[in-house]
Amino acid sequence: MKLKKLMEHISIIPDYRQAWKVEHKLSDILLLTICAVISGAEG
């Protein structure tokens, strides 16, 4: 799957966090998490 297509899918997930507490976009956090899991990151 291409990165752009993956980001399109991730971007539709609603972000219910309080806006004033947000430092990073939810889609960025989820993408990094997915990449870490795929690469075998632990802990």
Image (cartoon, rainbow, N blue to C red):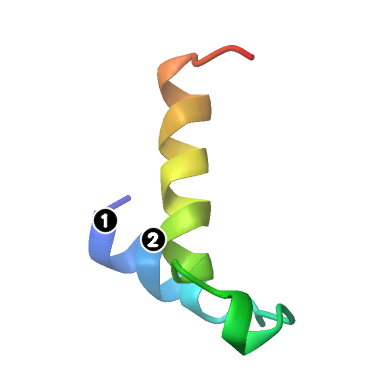
Residue nearest the observer in this picture, 16 or 10? 16
- Between the C-alphas of marks 2 and 1, the distance is 5 Å
The residue type indicated by label 1 comes to: Leu
For the residue carrying disc 1, how many other residues have a C-alpha within 10 Å: few (<14), some (14-19), or many (20+)? few
Q: Residue 19, which numbered label?
A: none
Which residue is depicted at the point 49% across and 55% down?
Answer: 29
The residue type indicated by label 2 comes to: Leu
**From what the image shows, is residue 40 above or below residue 36?**
above
Name the quadrant of the C terminus. Answer: top right
Which residue is depicted at the point 32% across and 66% down?
Answer: 5
Q: Please report contact status of discs 2 and 1: CB closer than 8 Å, yes or no.
A: yes
For the residue carrying disc 2, how many other residues have a C-alpha within 10 Å: few (<14), some (14-19), or many (20+)? few
Q: Residue 3, which numbered label?
A: 1
What x and y, as percent, mark residue 13? 62, 76
Which residue is depicted at the point 26% across and 56% down?
Answer: 3
Residue nearest the observer in this picture, 19 or 40? 19
In the image: residue 15, left or right of residue 25: right
**From what the image shows, is residue 33 above or below residue 37?**
below
The residue tagged 2 is: 6
**From what the image shows, is residue 42 above or below residue 3?**
above
In the image: residue 25, left or right of residue 43: left
Q: Secondary structure at mark 2?
A: helix
Q: Secondary structure at mark 1?
A: helix
Number of marks in the image?
2
What x and y, as percent, mark residue 38? 46, 26
Which residue is depicted at the point 39% across and 61% down?
Answer: 6
Q: Extreme front residue here?
A: 20
Q: Quadrant of residue 35?
A: top left
